[in-house]
């Protein structure tokens, strides 16, 4: 037996709480008489240890947890009446303990999340989180609590049997044995869901976390192993219950790639579409736009005559540079059907790179009678012949056509003077000598 441990085990005080750092260089022991002892040294190689009482009170110690951050070690102490913190090594060592909250917890109801260093405390009304800065947001879960642990993303809880008459459904199912039924629960606080819950016919004495799984040891000597399902299995369970929002949060938390997340958004969109919630369905389809065949979505909203939703999707296709000439044609037809000049103007005058097929857009504007917009596009993209053609053939704006030609540079006009003049003559425009008189 190690000498360091003989001094602890020989004490007559009842141990009520225990915590140790991962390398066993620091151990904290809480006692029912209200004292806390810290043991330091090399316990693994038995190279000697030192221990001292660092806290004394009249309140029984119900929990101790060590928060290690670089060279600073902070000890969180729980009593029946309060939560305290005390620096046991590093800067601030030797200062008196500070009260974190004037509310304690029961024995076994304090744990540490070793990934984050957060201290987790279970009370009957909720589950509370504490950091070096203070208390964080609680997780609501109202029930008596006997044991708590943290395993991966989950908070593990054991609740004692309900008092007689409190749970009539349980008593109806289990009869007299209801008074000895414990509840074992796993909560996912980030997703705000109960991941697992079951009734246990024997008191759970210990919660053990080893080999990547969770084990419980019951009073009747049985050991139960809990193994987490794969991400895909969990997603399928959420799909079956139409919990697509939770599925998306789970996928994001598990680091699934964008294409896998888009599959969830598309499934959610299909579910909302079937329920007739077209606006929300479109929101989900747009989230999945990068990995969805556009025709699958377009066909749905063409069939339901949801033109506003259709416009929204087609606009997003253009924003993501995934639109074809057919998509541009359909979008401009939708604008024309609604006579929505403002949206048409906004679409063709959108800044940045061209998001649509130019020839298709000009052709559709001309067919729809939007000659000014067609001329704008042609002029903006250097299609001078087309500008003149639109002004003369469509708008019959001869003066504007002549003014436009007059302000072109010589290199642009010179390649086809005969065509310009013959067209002017055919349409009764000013004769060539008048054209030559245009200002430079």
Image (cartoon, rainbow, N blue to C red):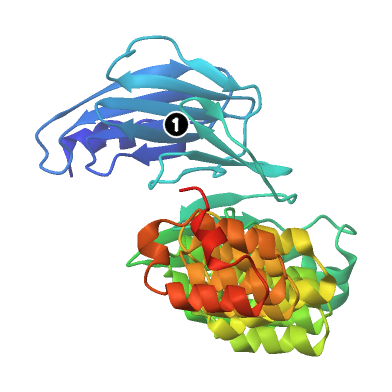
89 is higher (above) or lower (below) than 317: above
Evaluate whether residue 218 shows in this view.
Answer: no
Where residue 282 appears, as percent x and y from the top left, is: 71, 72
Q: Position of residue 375 (x, y in %)?
A: 61, 66
Q: Quadrant of residue 29?
A: top left
Residue at mark 1: 30
Question: Residue at image x 38%, y 34%?
Answer: 66
Residue 79 image position (x, y, % from top left): 57, 28
Q: Residue 391 is drawn in which quadrant?
A: bottom right
Q: Is residue 262 above or below residue 190?
A: below
7 lies left or right of 364 = left
Image check: 49 left or right of 267? left
Q: Nearer the viewer, residue 52 or 183?
A: 183
Q: Which element is circle 1 on? A: strand
Quick one: 15 or 110, which is closer to the camera?
110
Residue 28, image x, y percentages: 36, 32
Q: Residues within 10 Å of mark 1 (few under 14, many from 20)?
A: many
Instruction: Identify which residue is drawn at 38% across, 46% down.
Output: 114
Assign the N terminus to one quadrant of the image.
Answer: top left
Total numbered labels placed on residues in the image: 1
Camera-nearest residue between 347 and 163: 347
Residue at (54%, 44%) from the top-left corner?
108
Q: Is residue 75 above or below residue 94?
A: below
Write down the quadrant of residue 155 in the picture. bottom right
Residue 429 in view in this figure = yes
Q: Name the residue nearer the viewer: 386 or 74.
A: 386
Q: Residue at x 43, y 36 (%)?
A: 65
Among all residues in the image, which is located at the extreme front?
A: 433
């Amino acid at each position: 037996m190690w000498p360091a441990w003989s001094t602890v085990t020989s004490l007559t005080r009842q141990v009520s709480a225990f915590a140790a750092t991962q390398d066993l260089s620091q151990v904290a022991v809480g006692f029912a008489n209200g004292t806390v002892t810290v043991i330091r040294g090399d316990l693994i190689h038995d190279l000697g240890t030192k221990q001292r009482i660092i806290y004394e009170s009249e309140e029984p110690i119900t929990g101790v947890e060590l928060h290690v951050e670089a060279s600073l070690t902070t000890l969180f102490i729980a009593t029946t009446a309060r939560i305290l913190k005390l620096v046991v090594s590093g800067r601030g060592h030797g200062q008196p303990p500070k009260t974190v909250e004037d509310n304690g917890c029961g024995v076994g109801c304090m744990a540490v999340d070793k990934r984050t260093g957060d201290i987790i405390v279970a009370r009957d009304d909720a589950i509370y989180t504490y950091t070096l800065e203070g208390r964080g947001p609680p997780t609501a879960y109202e029930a008596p609590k006997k044991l708590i642990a943290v395993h991966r993303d989950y908070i593990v809880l054991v609740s004692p049997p309900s008092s007689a008459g409190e749970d009539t459904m349980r008593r109806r199912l289990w009869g007299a044995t209801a008074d000895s039924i414990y509840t074992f629960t796993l909560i996912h606080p980030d997703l705000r869901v109960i991941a697992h819950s079951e009734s246990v016919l024997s008191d759970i004495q210990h919660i053990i976390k080893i080999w990547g799984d969770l084990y419980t040891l019951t009073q009747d000597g049985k050991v139960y192993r809990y193994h987490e399902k794969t991400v895909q299995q969990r997603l399928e369970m959420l799909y079956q219950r139409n919990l697509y929002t939770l599925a998306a949060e789970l996928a994001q938390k598990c680091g699934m790639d964008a294409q896998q997340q888009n599959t969830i958004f598309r499934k959610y969109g299909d579910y909302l579409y079937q329920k007739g919630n077209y606006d929300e369905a479109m929101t989900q389809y747009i989230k999945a736009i990068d990995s969805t065949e556009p025709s699958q979505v377009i066909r749905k909203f063409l069939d339901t005559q949801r033109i506003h939703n259709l416009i929204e999707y087609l606009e997003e296709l253009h924003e993501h540079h995934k639109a074809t000439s057919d998509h541009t044609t359909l979008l401009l037809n939708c604008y024309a059907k609604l006579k929505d000049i403002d949206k048409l103007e906004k679409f063709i005058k959108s800044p940045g790179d061209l998001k649509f097929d130019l020839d298709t857009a000009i052709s559709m504007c001309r067919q729809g009678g939007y000659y000014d917009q067609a001329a704008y596009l042609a002029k903006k993209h250097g299609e001078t012949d087309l500008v003149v053609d639109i002004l003369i053939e469509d708008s019959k704006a001869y003066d504007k056509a002549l003014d436009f030609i007059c302000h072109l540079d010589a290199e642009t006009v010179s390649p086809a003077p005969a065509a310009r003049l013959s067209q002017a003559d055919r349409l009764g425009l000013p004769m060539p000598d008048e054209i030559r008189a245009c200002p430079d």
